[in-house]
Image (spheres, grey):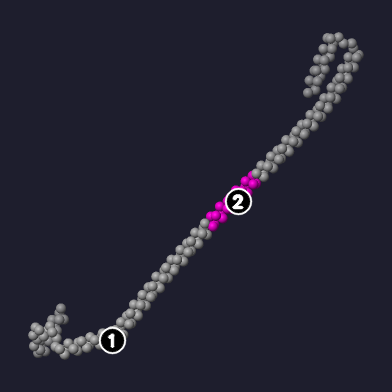
């Protein structure tokens, strides 16, 4: 505001008489020269400044568009990598589950095999024990037969040497039973 006041003061001091209308409406020559200057300024602006400004704005717009496209490309790439990682994780989980299932299957097969072999060995041991018991029973029976035969021969020889009455017969049988009981 102070600048405007200074201009008015200087214009008044220069000896120009200014009326109120002259201050608002410029002189015709000034108006024409002002329009010519404005037109020249506009021509220079349209031919030189605006193209450079538009070029700069277009470059900036292209740069921003390039950054947007690059960001979109990176977003798509990141999404693709995320999907690949998710697929790899799913594959790894599937493979881990397959390995666990295979291990379970192998363990079940080994358990069944070990159980089968243990049962087979137990059956063989039982069979051998039966065979051993049968052979031992056969041997014991053979021994008993031999002893019974010997005792029978001894008893018969004693009977033949003596004449038996019912009381003596009962005493010999009791003696024979006691001898058999003593052998066991």
Which stretch appears magenta? 91-111
Residue 167 located within the stretch drawn in magenta:
no
Whether residue 75 sits left or right of residue 125 in the image: it is: left
Quadrant assignment for the N terminus: bottom left
Confirm whether residue 9 shows in the render.
no
Rendered position, 2 above or below 108:
below
Q: CA distance from mark 2 to mark 1?
A: 84 Å
Can the viewer see residue 117 in this picture?
Answer: yes
Residue 101 painted magenta: yes
**Helix, strand or loop for disc 1:** helix
Report the residue marked by disc 2. 102
Where is residue 56? Give x, y as percent: 34, 79
- Using the image as rendered, state which of residue 65 and residue 135 is in the foreground: 65
Residue 139 placed where, x, y %?
82, 29
Decide which of tag 2 and tag 1 comes sooner along the chain: 1
Whole-percent x, y for residue 87 in the image = 51, 59
Q: Quadrant of residue 17?
A: bottom left
Question: Mark 2: few, some, or many residues within 10 Å (few <14, many ≥20)?
Answer: few
Percent position (x, y) of residue 102? 60, 51
27 relative to 164, above or below: below
Q: Is residue 93 left or right of residue 109?
A: left
What residue do we see at 65% from left, 44% from top? 112
Asked if residue 12 lies left or right of residue 173, the reply is left
Relative height, residue 130 to residue 46 (above, below): above
**Residue, disc 1:** 44
Helix, strand, or loop for circle 2? helix
Between 160 and 62, the residue placed more toward the observer is: 62
* Quadrant (top left/top right/bottom left/bottom right) for the C terminus: top right
Looking at the image, residue 33 sits to the left or right of residue 152; the answer is left
């Amino acid at each position: 505001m102070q600048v405007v006041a200074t201009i008015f003061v200087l214009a008044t001091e220069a000896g120009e008489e200014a009326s109120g209308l002259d201050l608002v409406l410029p002189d015709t020559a000034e108006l024409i020269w002002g329009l010519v200057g404005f037109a020249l300024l506009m021509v220079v602006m349209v031919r030189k400044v605006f193209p450079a400004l538009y070029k700069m704005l277009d470059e900036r717009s292209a740069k921003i568009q390039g950054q947007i496209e690059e960001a979109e490309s990176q977003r798509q790439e990141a999404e693709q990598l995320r999907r690949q990682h998710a697929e790899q994780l799913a594959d790894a989980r599937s493979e881990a589950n397959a390995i666990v299932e295979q291990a379970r299957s192998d363990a079940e097969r080994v358990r069944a095999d070990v159980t089968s072999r243990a049962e087979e060995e137990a059956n063989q041991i039982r069979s051998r024990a039966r065979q051993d018991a049968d052979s031992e029973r056969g041997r014991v029976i053979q021994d008993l037969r031999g002893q019974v035969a010997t005792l029978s021969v001894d008893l018969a020889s004693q009977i033949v040497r003596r004449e038996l009455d019912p009381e003596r017969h009962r005493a010999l049988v009791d003696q024979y039973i006691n001898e058999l009981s003593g052998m066991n």
